[in-house]
Image: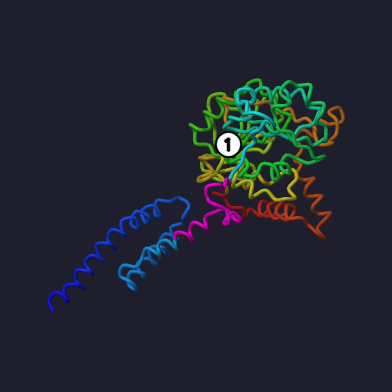
Amino acid sequence: MKLSGCLPLLAEQKSRHSCLCSLLPTASLLCLAFKHQGVSWWSKLEIFGDILQGLKISRWGIDGLVSSKFNKCEKQCRPNGSEPLPKDIVVTASNLEMRPLWGASKRSYQNPVNSSSNIFAMAVGIKQKDLVNKMVTKFLSSDFAVMLFHYDGIVDEWKDFDWSNRVIHVTAVNQTKWWFAKRFLHPDIVEEYDYVFLWDEDLGVDNFDPKLYVHIIESEGLEISQPALDPYKSEVHHQITARGRRSTVHRRTFRPSNGGKGCDVNSTAPPCTGWIEMMAPVFSRAAWRCVWYMIQNDLIHAWGLDMQLGYCAQGDRTKNVGVVDSEYVIHYGRPTLGGPEENETSSNSRVKDHRADEDKICILHLHQPSPSCINLLLYEMLVNFNVLRPIM
């Protein structure tokens, strides 16, 4: 009788020992779950709560519960549409590396594109080929990937340059860089690049070194930035973009109050601080992923987008957005995209605020306004009535 009474006890002890052994990998999985960056804290707590509930229901039968929960979580964390595929073959991002038709990849020959850690993209027209050539040459020599958006539809005439076959060419007539960027610079495509340079074509880079610039913004922790403008040779629209001779980087500007719109040390809103212009923006990988989602499909000139970049600063915009003074450019302000020729452009047009033109276009289409028009008009109303709050 005693022996038979001991058998269940021994069996139970063995069972417990076996279950305790099985708990070790389960505990390890729990630790991994709470360490895994792709799982939200709420999901982690749900998993843990379900496990505790499972312990109440079945003292030792939790292996299946943990396994099923992690399988469910794993599927939820995978890219949409990839669930039927073996996880080892799923590639979530891409790049701009060009592959040869035959043989192994000749990285030594195509090094500027294939091993780049940063990307330089620009909307170009053949009329500005002198400036474009200088920029592309400088960025390629600094091991950047380069992508050119041809808004005039002309591609073959660029073959005269030695670098033509080493850059990516995309063409669509009369489209701006924001149209191209929304469609060809998806965050998953440029995931491998640390910084995205999305510039206009009318810039002079004689005093600009791409490698030094990247080193500066990394050391300064700038998520969104631009090179300063030479104030003596450039078309400067906003004081904050003008170069300061005594600093490496500046994050704010100062100007006397003019009807309550001055900039001082207490200013927290753009364009006094945490603000850049859109002709030569530079985005970190994380900032660009955010900005890409903010770009509307009908966005043309991006007027007003500069005031919203604070949402994508990955923290305090007054610290993470800045202008680099030591590496600066010249903004020539040349007309592009079918605009008037230089000899037809009056001196007054160089300081003209083109948002007024956008306002007129929006007013003419109020019967069926686009989202960009609605956003622009609302923004102007907030500014006019002094109800706009700083974007942090």
Vertical order, 140 against 357 (above or below): above
Residue 376 in percent (x, y) is at 71, 51
Q: Give how far across and how far down residue 329 sits, in percent.
A: 65, 26
Left/right of residue 29 with respect to residue 365 in the rendered view: left
Q: Image quadrant for the N terminus?
A: bottom left
Q: Does the magenta stretch include residue 89?
A: yes
Decide which of 141, 60 is in the foreground and name it. 60
The residue that mark 1 highlights is 193
Identity of the residue furthest to the right in this view: 344
Q: Which of 131 and 27 is in front in this view?
A: 27
Identity, as a three-letter code, of the amino acid under mark 1? Tyr
Write the residue at 69% across / 33% down. Answer: 147
Observer-nearest of 13 and 46: 13
Residue 55 image-quadrant placement: bottom left
Please provide the residue range marked out in magenta. Answer: 70-92
- Identify the residue at the far bottom of this view: 1
Q: Position of residue 241 (x, y in %)?
A: 63, 33
Residue at position x 26%, y 66% from top?
Answer: 15
For the residue pair 313 and 145, the one nearer the viewer reads as 145
Name which quarter of the figure residue 60 lies in. bottom left
Residue 67 visible here: yes
Q: Position of residue 304 (x, y in %)?
A: 68, 46
Residue 332 sits above or below residue 94 on the image: above
